[in-house]
Image (cartoon, rainbow, N blue to C red):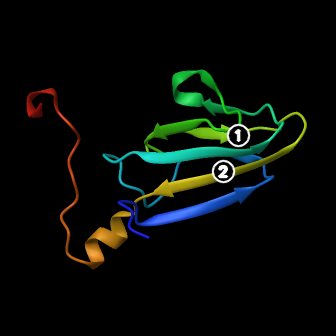
Amino acid sequence: WPSIFSGLEIIANRVTFSHRDGGGSPSLLDLLVSLGRNHEATLALADLNAELDYSPGAMVYISGRVLEHSVGPWLNGEQFVIAHFMKDAVHNRVGCQGLGFPCRASF
């Protein structure tokens, strides 16, 4: 199927320890989609000292390379996450120049 993302990962019933995504593009956003049923998960963003509701149906855009993030243990149910991301190596391989950071002046 067509997608703007160069990679997709499915994470099932797994605690994700605090990390940054190596190889990702710092100027592009990753899409994290929380699925499953009857779970109460949170997405922690350590750099922002924030915890976001990560219940089924939640969709979050973050720069995974820039922001340290994790998903700790959840209560009840099953949890699935579909992580959509872009890797600089893919852009480099096909000769696409990486995108810069969005600037207010561009809009």
For this orientation, the residue located farthest to the front is 1
Quadrant of the image containing the C terminus:
top left
Residue located at (15% from left, 27% from top)? 104
Is residue 93 found left or right of 9 in the rendered image? Answer: left
Against 75, is 36 above or below?
below
Against 85, is 74 above or below?
above
x%, y% of residue 56? Answer: 70, 38
x%, y% of residue 5? Answer: 40, 60
**Foreground of the two, 21 or 4:** 4
Q: Is residue 85 visible?
A: yes
How many discs appear?
2
Is residue 43 found left or right of 24 in the rendered image? Answer: right
Residue located at (42% from left, 57% from top)? 24
Asked if marks 1 and 2 touch (Cβ < 8 Å), the reply is: yes
Q: Closer to the N terminus: mark 1 or mark 2?
A: 1
C-alpha span from label 1 to label 2: 10 Å
- Look at the numbered disc 1 and give the secondary structure of its residue: strand
Pointer 1: what residue?
71
Is residue 26 found left or right of 80 in the rendered image? Answer: left
**Foreground of the two, 28 or 35:** 35
For this orientation, the residue located farthest to the top is 49
- Look at the numbered disc 2 and give the secondary structure of its residue: strand
Residue located at (20% from left, 47% from top)? 100
Pointer 2: what residue?
81
Q: Residues within 10 Å of mark 2 (few under 14, many from 20)?
A: many
